[in-house]
Image (cartoon, rainbow, N blue to C red):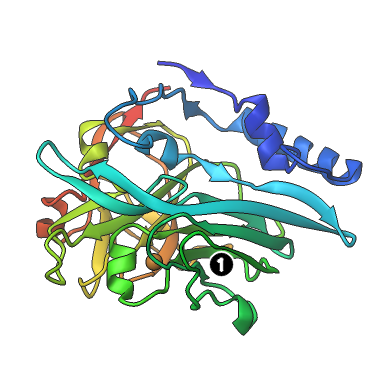
Amino acid sequence: MFSHQLTRRQLLLRSGLGVGLVSAAVGCRGLSQSRAIAQSVKVPDVPPTPTGKYPYDPMAVLRDFDYGQVIQENGRLLRQFEVTARSTPVKLNAAITFMTWSLNGRVPAPTLRAKAGERLRIIFHNEDATSHSLHFHGTHPASMDGVKPVRRGKTFIYEFDAEPYGVHPYHCHIAPVTHHIGKGLYGLLIIDPPVERPPADELVLVMGGYDLKKQDKNDIYAFNGIPNFYRDRPIEIYQHQLVRLYLLNMIEFDAAVTFHIHANMFQVYPTGRTLTPSEETDVITMGPAERHILEFTYHYPGMYMFHPHQDQIAERGCMGHFKVLPV
Ligand SMILES: [Cu+2]
C-alpha cells in the first residue's frame, strides 16, 4: 500500500492559490499551513474508479473539496464557485438507472469550502428543463436565501459572507422540495473556523434516499449517491490516523436516521459549530439536514462496517466499510 503527500495542486487549492489573484501575504501563510498538514497526515493513494459505469467517482467525492476561484475584491478575499444543474442518469445497481438532478454532474453536489469571514460568490447555472434554486444553510440576507426559482437556461449569482463557521447543507428549494432533494440536488458547504482544526484525513459522506416510484417513500439509499459503493469498495484509511468525517443526512421521508461505526467510538462536533467535541459515542441520530463533524482513529487494522442502525436503510444501500491499513 502507498501513502502520498498531498499533491502540489491540492496544496495550492487548500491555500487559496489555485486560481486567480491573491496577495502574497495570504498565499505564504496558507502554503506553510498546508505543508504542515501534508507532512503530518497519511492519506492512502487511492486509484480512480474505472470510468464508464458512473458519471462521477464516489471514491474521489470522499476527499474532493472545491475551494473555488480566489479573487481579491474590495480589499477582501472572495471565493467564486460555479455550479450547474442538469439531468444526469446514474446507475444505482445492476437493474436500475435513475435520472438524477445533479450539480456539476454529481450526487451529492461539490463540497464547497471556505473560511469564516470570506466572501462567497456562487454562480448557479440551470441547464435543466425544470426550475431549480440553491438554498444555503448559514447566515445571509433574504435576497440570497435561494427560494426563488431559477428557470431553465438562466443563471443566478448568490453572494454572501461565509458565516458562521461549521458544516452547512445547500440544496434546491423548489416545490415539491422532497422531489427536488430526493433526485439529488444537495451538497455541503464547509466553512472552516478562523483557527484551523488539527490535521486529519478528511472525508465527506452524505446520506441520500431515492424515491424511485414517486410514492413519497425511499426505495433505495446511498452514501454519496451510489448505493453500496463503499460496501463493495471499502474506504481506505490508515491505522492511528485521525479521521475527520463531515457527515450530512439529506434523506427525505424518513423522520430520522442514525449513523454508526463498528468497533470504535467517535467524537461529535454538532453542526461543525464547536472546536471541542460535545460527546463521544458510536451511534448518532440525525433528522433531515442535520450534519456533524465526527472524529475517530482506528488502532487495529482490518475491515469495519459503517451504516445507519436502522438496518432496513442499511440493507437498501446505505452501507459501507472502512479498510484500516497498517502503518
Ligand atoms: Cu430543484
Rendered view: 283 above or below 146:
above
Estimate the x, y position of residue 70 in percent, counting from the top left: 75, 48
Estimate the x, y position of residue 294 in percent, counting from the top left: 42, 55
Label 1 element class: loop
- Left or right: 41 in relation to 59: right
Q: Quadrant of the N terminus?
A: top left
Question: Residue most toward the top?
Answer: 1
Residue 192 appears in the figure: no
Q: Quadrant of ligand 1?
A: bottom left
- Left or right: 255 in relation to 164: left
218 or 265, which lies in front?
A: 218
Amino acid beneath label 1: Thr
Rendered view: 65 above or below 74:
above
Estimate the x, y position of residue 244 in percent, counting from the top left: 47, 48
Count the numbered circles shown.
Answer: 1
Q: Which residue is located at x 49 percent, y 78 percent? A: 147
Question: Residue most toward the bottom?
Answer: 142
- Left or right: 268 in relation to 209: right
Residue 223 appears in the figure: yes
Query: What residue is disc 1 on?
Result: 274
Q: Which residue is located at x 71 percent, y 34 percent? A: 12
